[in-house]
């Protein structure tokens, strides 16, 4: 016959096993946290610190002199202008594609998704060369455009076009999985209650996808501002005309102006930080 002590032994052993089992869990938990902090500091914090150290090594006055050079100011303006043009267009494109893919079934649907993702698999340099062979003076459509006195390559519109191509999947890739997971029940209910198509979109669909749309826009914006390869092919890198900020940084390095190059790099980093801060503020506002 088992005593109370014997009956309590398994419970004590199980409790001891749970305590011993939790210890490795806590250890792995802290190891992951420390590893994430160390790796983030090494691969993100250190490079950013180096950028600002070299940018400010000759003093604040020299730093502001470098970033206020006319060519650098124009590069910053052109980079921001490209983002202001490209990001809204890609947001509209991403919403339309996601709506079409997730709400309708039609032949070639899978092929359409593949086409949307092609820019992810194509090198930006290849994309730039493709646009050059298509719209250049010796390209497929170049002679036709020249007859109407239209020039696309080595102009600002060429930067817009190639940036649209490179960044086109970002918003759609964020929206498609979310809209597939949500289903169409809310939209069907709204239509059943008498809502029009536009009312359904603005009052049902758009509020449900706003965070994915925001994340896609932020990613698209970051890629537009940092794009180098495709833009370098189609822009011609003309100082003060078709130089975006990444191209301006390369030109400054080639001119052995290290301080100016790092000052321009710090400007690009600050633009990225401002973008993330705006995203955070929007999230807080929506949560409140």
Image (spheres, rainbow, N blue to C red):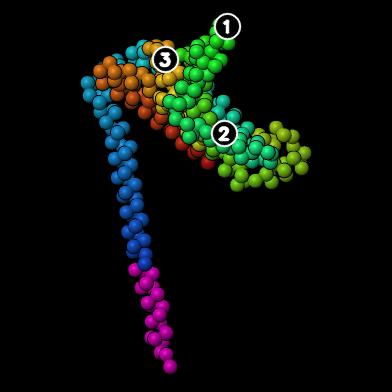
Q: Nearer the viewer, residue 194 or 260?
A: 260
Residue located beneath label 3 in the image: 236
Q: CA distance from mark 2 to mark 1?
A: 32 Å
Badge 3 marks a residue whose secondary structure is loop
Quadrant containing the N terminus is bottom left
Q: Is residue 64 left or right of residue 214?
A: left
Badge 2 marks a residue whose secondary structure is helix
Q: Is residue 208 visible?
A: no
Near mark 1 (Cα within 10 A), the count class, few <14, some 14-19 or many ≥20, is: few
Badge 1 marks a residue whose secondary structure is helix
Number of numbered discs overlaid on the protein picture: 3
- Image coordinates of residue 95 in percent, x first then y, are 60, 33
Eyeballing the image, is 84 above or below 287? above
- Image coordinates of residue 186 in percent, x first then y, are 68, 44
Q: Is residue 17 magenta?
A: yes
Q: CA distance from mark 3 to mark 2?
A: 28 Å
For the stretch drawn in magenta, the main secondary structure is helix
Q: CA distance from mark 3 to mark 1?
A: 22 Å
Residue located beneath label 1 in the image: 147
Magenta part of the chain: 1-20
Q: Is residue 266 visible?
A: yes
Near mark 2 (Cα within 10 A), the count class, few <14, some 14-19 or many ≥20, is: few
The quadrant in which residue 97 appears is: top right
The quadrant in which residue 260 appears is: top left
Q: Nearer the viewer, residue 101 or 222?
A: 101
Check whether the beta carbons of the residues at disc 3 and disc 1 lie within 8 A of each other.
no
- Please report whichever mark, 3 or 1, sits nearer to the chain's N-terminal start: 1
| Residue at (65% x, 46% y) in the render | 183
Which mark is drawn over residue 115?
Answer: 2
Q: Is residue 172 left or right of residue 14?
A: right
Eyeballing the image, is 11 above or below 59? below
């Amino acid at each position: 016959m088992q005593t109370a002590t014997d009956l309590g032994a398994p419970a004590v052993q199980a409790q001891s096993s749970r305590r011993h089992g939790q210890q490795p869990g806590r250890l792995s938990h802290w190891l992951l946290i420390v590893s994430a902090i160390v790796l983030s500091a090494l691969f993100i914090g250190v490079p950013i610190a180096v950028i600002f150290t070299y940018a400010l090594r000759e003093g604040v006055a020299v730093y502001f002199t470098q970033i206020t050079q006319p060519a650098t100011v124009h590069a910053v303006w052109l980079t921001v202008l490209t983002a202001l043009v490209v990001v809204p267009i890609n947001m509209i494109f991403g919403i339309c594609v996601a709506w079409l893919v997730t709400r309708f079934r039609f032949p070639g649907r899978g092929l359409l998704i593949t086409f949307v993702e092609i820019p992810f698999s194509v090198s930006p340099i290849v994309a730039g060369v493709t646009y050059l062979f298509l719209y250049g003076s010796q390209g497929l459509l170049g002679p036709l455009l020249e007859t109407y006195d239209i020039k696309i390559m080595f102009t600002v519109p060429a930067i817009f076009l190639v940036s649209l191509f490179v960044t086109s999947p970002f918003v759609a890739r964020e929206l498609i999985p979310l809209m597939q997971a949500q289903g169409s029940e809310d939209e069907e209910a709204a239509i059943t209650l008498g809502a029009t198509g536009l009312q359904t979109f603005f009052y049902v669909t758009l509020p449900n996808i706003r965070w994915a749309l925001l994340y896609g826009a932020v990613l698209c914006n970051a890629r537009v501002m940092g794009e180098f390869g495709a833009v370098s092919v189609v822009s011609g890198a003309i100082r003060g005309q078709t130089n975006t900020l990444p191209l301006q940084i390369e030109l400054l390095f080639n001119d052995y102006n290290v301080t100016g190059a790092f000052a321009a790099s710090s400007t690009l980093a600050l633009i990225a930080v401002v973008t993330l801060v705006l995203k955070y503020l929007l999230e807080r506002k929506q949560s409140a």
